[in-house]
Image (cartoon, rainbow, N blue to C red):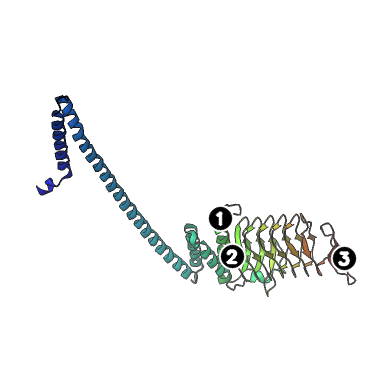
Amino acid sequence: MKRFLRSPLLWTFVVSLVLLLAVGGWLLTDPATSRSEALKTGGIAGGAIVALYALWLNDRRRRVEERRQEVERQRQELELRRADQDRDRISDERFAKAVELLGHEADQVRVGALHALAGLARGREIYKQTVLDILCSYLRRPFEHPRYQDTAKRDGNTAPEEGSAEEDQELQVRQTAQRLIGELLPAADSEGTPGYDLDLTGAVLEYFDLSERKIGKLLLRYAGLYSSTNLSGCVFLGPVYLTGAGTKEKKRIGFFRCSDAKFEQRAWFSGVRFSEDVEFRDTVFAGETSFKDSVFAKDAVFADAEFKGTLDLRRARFEGFGDLSFREPPGTVSLYNTSVEPARDHELPSGWSVETLPDGRARLTVKDL
């Protein structure tokens, strides 16, 4: 009973009735006002109170609904945060387990761990650079195989020498890691994608193929690149260092392809020994470029390459055919004892020439240098 007496609806009707009677009675005291007009005016006054109550009630319902929706939104956000935390926990557990299995004795288990890491990187972008670092770290581990020891003697059509079962199994694991690195990197023509860094310092790689990929910083210092390496069509957003590659004991560089690529920052090939043919056809070098002290044991093709920065060829040796018909000669070039094979007819930029020395050797010279 008390609750009913406190009801806003009851008091609304009471006030409305009182107002109806008060206004109607007051108007009836005026002889000029008819009874119907007095009742009508009193009804309008009472109805206004009911209308105000209806508006207040509607506003109250609206606020209650807004509060309910806010509570529901907060509940959904909490569930999403919990789901994200669960997903992060599961991903971290998968990551830790996969890294642990990289040290397993069985090669198939190591291959499975590599694929697990790659799958994690594909599903969670935040893991991609970390997974690439782990794949590169695995490839930086010391590795030798008999097929790498006779590359200087083996003909191109001769099958490579087989190693022990353990060596061949490890070779398969390493080639899987190489392939996964290429698959995880974004396409060279993709927009809005970052360039991921690769640190392969001292790594032993064979048939390494990153063609048509976008890369951040690339480190291949003192690496061994066997059989062939394909970096054609790559876009390098960061600096690239191959300093000393192919010069360490038992390490060589096979056929090296880097055509139609773009180096947006420094490209450092100083002290590199290329044991097979080299191709930099249509490649753009936007920053400083150095081939200082490098050796090109066979043909080196730079046809239509473009150097927008400086080019350093000091003490470089072209022991085979050299095609240096650049799209445009570099604005600044450094030549000092840059030797070429005197018996070959090299393709040179305008203003460049071959000077034969008294001891039978030949070197490159440029006018006004």
Element at label 2? strand
| CA–CA distance in space, label 1 to label 3 | 48 Å
Task: Tell me the tag on residue 193.
Answer: 1
* Residue 358 appears in view: yes
Q: Amino acid at mark 2?
A: Leu
Q: Which callout, 1 or 2, points at the residue further toward the start of the chain? A: 1
| Residue position for label 3 | 355
Mark-to-mark CA distance, 2 and 3 = 41 Å
Q: Quadrant of residue 348?
A: bottom right
User: Which residue is drawn at the image coordinates 43% and 63% (left, top)?
Assistant: 91
- First in sequence: mark 2 or mark 3? 2
110 displayed left or right of 363: left
Q: Quadrant of the C terminus?
A: bottom right
Q: Quadrant of residue 166?
A: bottom right
> Mark 2 — residue?
198
Report x, y in % for residue 167.
58, 71
Tell me the residue at 14%/32% (across/down): 26
The crowd level at tag 3 (other Cα within 10 Å; few <14, some 14-19, many 20+) is some
Q: Residue furthest right?
A: 358
Residue shown at the point (62%, 64%) measured from the top left: 218
Mark earlier in primary sequence (1, 3): 1
Helix, strand or loop under label 1: loop
Q: Secondary structure at mark 3?
A: strand
Tell me, yes or no, whether the two marked residues, 1 and 2, touch with CB atoms within 8 Å: no
Question: In terms of image quadrants, where is residue 313?
Answer: bottom right
Amino acid at the residue labelled 1: Thr
The local crowd at label 1, few if under 14, some if 14 to 19, many if 20 or more residues have their Cα within 10 Å, is few
